[in-house]
Image (tube, helix red, strand yellow):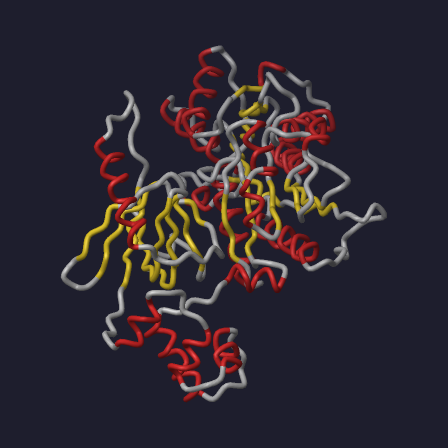
């Protein structure tokens, strides 16, 4: 459950829109904006404290859509909600999680206020109430510095009394941008993408931008819908980390808004790109195990059915390069598949490997979650890490350092990935060609990785 405090609500046939003016839970929204709830109907009741508690379903954050309250449509929507709530759901279906919105009300009972609140409140209304010019009201709402504190206080008091809100849509049309960045990632549950998202939000906040998310990891069509659907109309530009699209889809990817692509397998020379060192990082991790004396090194997380899917083929390439450079044979039996990169899949991969008579002395895992599962299964079978088998993961997630033994891992430097992605995107939004752009006019930035060594790959001479 998430809670936001709101000032205005409008309900119509297209859904519900609520203006956020205060964050009660930091997970809800960044800054001031609008929430729209598509296909949703609210239930509402007044409590003794003068608040209207509204339950909102299927929440999708959308900024800059100024819609006013309509009591008649709200009553009509409540009737629809009751019918929806009482309707029987199909087998194995459940209602979506809801957001609780607290609708505040301000009671000023003078005749002027009542008349004004029956129509749209304008800057002229605020100016008359505060006894100042319309230009002064404009200076206050646009946060110009050269306004006396006493005048600013009067204007803000009038805004609060009348319930005035700046029409952000009109303002953004005048300015030509909304200060909203879109971020599309495959799976926000993965530590890699969760940390990337957090860093993007941090970098955006420093630049005065807001971020809205749209997970895209279901399939190829979902990723195309992110690029060409309504989501792209909500933002000034998009940071896109695809999982299913690749260079063979170039003809279907063309967009007319600023776009920065993260990852190797969609290397289009018509968009700015930020790459992580998947191949180099895995080559270094495997080479380090070889330096430590490992000679039968397994890799967990191979996607055997498709060689141009996500980061798997690039990390596999780095593994094979390290073996070849050391003169070690490439044994296909040591390339262990894992369809999904979660802990159970890592444990299952180790179980299948050991049950099949394969006993490695080193393991590199495609991500830290696989490594965690692998280490758990090794421990369950009485195989000690790092004495019997050395293990290295990828992502350098926060959890990796708190395992026992702590997990060695490749750090892809996601903070720098986020910083460069925002820098390139903001340059494009503001009409600049990035400094990193090559002769073709577009940038390709490779963010270096590093191997963080911990107990799981400690040399045999160490306790």
Query: Splitting the image into 4 quarters, where does residue 311 fall?
Result: top right
**Residue 460 visible in the picture:** no
Q: How many marks?
A: 0
357 shown above or below 115? above
Where residue 182 sits: x, y (%)? Answer: 55, 48
The residue shown at (76%, 41%) is: 270
Q: Indicate the quadrant where residue 290 lies.
A: top right
Residue 126 at x, y = what percent? 41, 77
Report the residue at 62% width, 50% height from top.
237
Report the side of 278 relative to 118 (left or right). Answer: right
**What residue do we see at 64% from left, 50% from top?**
421
The image shows residue 447 at horizontal and vertical percentages of 67, 47
- Looking at the image, which is closer to me, 297 or 372? 372
The residue located at (35%, 72%) in the rendering is 162
The answer to whether residue 438 is above or below residue 132 is above
Instruction: Kindly give the residue lying farthest to the right in the view shown.
Output: 439
Can residue 69 be seen in this snapshot? yes
Say which of 56 and 321 sits in front.
56
- For residue 83, above or below residue 295: below
Foreground of the two, 179 or 268: 179
Q: Farthest residue in the top direction? A: 356
Position of residue 375 measured from the top left corner of the image (x, y, whole percent): 43, 30
């Amino acid at each position: 459950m998430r809670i936001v405090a709101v000032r205005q609500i409008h309900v119509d046939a297209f859904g519900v829109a609520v203006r956020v003016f205060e964050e009660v839970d930091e997970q809800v929204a960044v800054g001031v904006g609008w929430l729209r709830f598509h296909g949703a109907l609210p239930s509402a009741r007044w409590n003794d404290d003068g608040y209207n508690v509204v339950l909102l379903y299927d929440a999708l954050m959308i900024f800059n859509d100024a819609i006013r309250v309509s009591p008649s449509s709200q009553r009509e929507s409540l009737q629809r909600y009751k019918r929806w709530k009482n309707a029987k759901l199909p087998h194995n279906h459940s209602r979506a999680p809801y957001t609780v919105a607290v609708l505040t009300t301000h009671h000023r009972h003078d005749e002027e206020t009542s008349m004004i609140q029956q129509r749209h409140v304008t800057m002229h209304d605020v100016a008359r109430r505060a006894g100042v010019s319309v230009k002064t009201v404009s200076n206050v709402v646009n946060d110009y510095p050269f306004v006396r504190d006493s005048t600013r206080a009067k204007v803000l008091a009038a805004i609060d009394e009348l319930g005035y809100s700046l029409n952000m849509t009109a303002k953004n049309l005048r300015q030509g941008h909304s200060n909203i960045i879109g971020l599309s990632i495959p799976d926000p549950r993965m530590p890699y993408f969760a940390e990337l998202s957090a860093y993007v939000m941090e970098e955006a906040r420093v630049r005065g931008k807001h971020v809205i998310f749209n997970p895209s990891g279901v399939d190829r069509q979902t990723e195309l819908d992110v690029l060409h659907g309504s989501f792209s109309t909500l933002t000034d530009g998009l940071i896109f980390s695809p999982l299913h699209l690749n260079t063979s889809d170039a003809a279907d990817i063309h967009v007319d808004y600023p776009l920065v692509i993260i990852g190797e397998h969609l290397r289009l020379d018509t968009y700015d790109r930020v790459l992580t060192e998947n191949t180099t990082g895995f080559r270094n991790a495997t080479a380090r195990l070889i330096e430590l004396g490992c000679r039968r090194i397994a890799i967990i997380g191979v996607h055997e059915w498709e060689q141009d899917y996500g980061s798997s083929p690039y990390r596999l390439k780095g593994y094979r390069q390290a073996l070849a450079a050391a003169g070690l044979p490439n044994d296909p039996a040591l390339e262990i598949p894992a369809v999904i990169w979660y802990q159970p899949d890592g444990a299952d991969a180790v179980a299948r490997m050991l049950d099949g008579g394969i006993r490695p002395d080193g393991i590199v895992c495609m991500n830290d979650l696989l490594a965690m599962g692998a280490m758990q299964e090794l421990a369950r079978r009485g195989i000690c890490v790092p004495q019997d088998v050395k293990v290295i993961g990828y992502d350098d997630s926060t959890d990796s350092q708190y395992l026992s033994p702590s997990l060695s891992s490749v750090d892809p430097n996601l903070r720098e990935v986020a910083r460069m992605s925002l820098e390139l995107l903001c340059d494009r939004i503001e009409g600049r060609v990035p400094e990193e752009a090559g002769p073709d006019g577009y940038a390709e930035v490779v963010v270096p990785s590093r191997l963080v060594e911990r107990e799981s790959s400690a040399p045999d001479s160490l306790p």
